[in-house]
Amino acid sequence: MDLQIDDFHKDAAAGLLRLHRAFPRKIALYVEDLIGREEPDEFGLPSTRHQSCLSALLWLAEEGYLRFDSTIRHEALDQAVLSEKGFLRLSRTVAGATPADPALPAGVRRVRATLAWQLREALAEGDGERLVRLGRLIFDNSSTSRPET
């Protein structure tokens, strides 16, 4: 099992969702806010888990899902914001995710069908398998999810 890949999906989702909540404002995106406090090793270096989360955020930036001005030591990305690519991916509708309750207002059904909403639910429920499945949609360019209409 590649547990670091599961952690990557969780970290990517958590980081992108924090930026989505703040969008379009720029924020400091702290690793500790995403994964909790991790004690440094005996040499004062960040834990492997902490380094992995920061690396996931840096990779997302390299791949064009977010932008940032600088790092704050090994603790955060400063002045981070979703890129257009990241915003559009999180805003698109996940196929088959539209709530069936016709009593809900159309706007509520639309929001709950987005990838951002679905990821938030999976994180809140601690549903690792659903999170990995949805996390893959962040990086998927195919028709498994469709753009908002």
Image (spheres, rainbow, N blue to C red):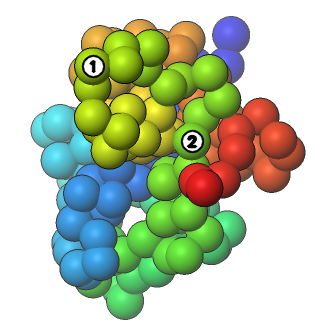
Residue at 66% x, 29% y is 95
Identify whether 106 is placed above or below 62.
above
Q: Quadrant of the N terminus?
A: top right
What distance separates the C-alpha of mark 2 from that of mark 1? 19 Å
Q: Are marks 2 and 1 in contact (CB under 8 Å)?
A: no
Residue at 22% x, 66% y is 22
| Residue pointed to by mark 2 | 93
Q: Is residue 47 left or right of residue 51?
A: left
Q: Is residue 138 left or right of residue 50?
A: right
Residue 61: mark: none
> How far from the left and from the top, in percent, is residue 125?
29, 13
- Amino acid type of the residue that numbered disc 2 sits on in the rendered structure: Thr
Q: Compare marks 2 and 1 and give the one earlier in the sequence.
A: 2
Q: Nearer the viewer, residue 148 or 79?
A: 148
> How far from the left and from the top, in percent, is residue 44?
22, 53
Identify whether 78 is placed above or below 6.
below
> How far from the left and from the top, in percent, is residue 18?
27, 54
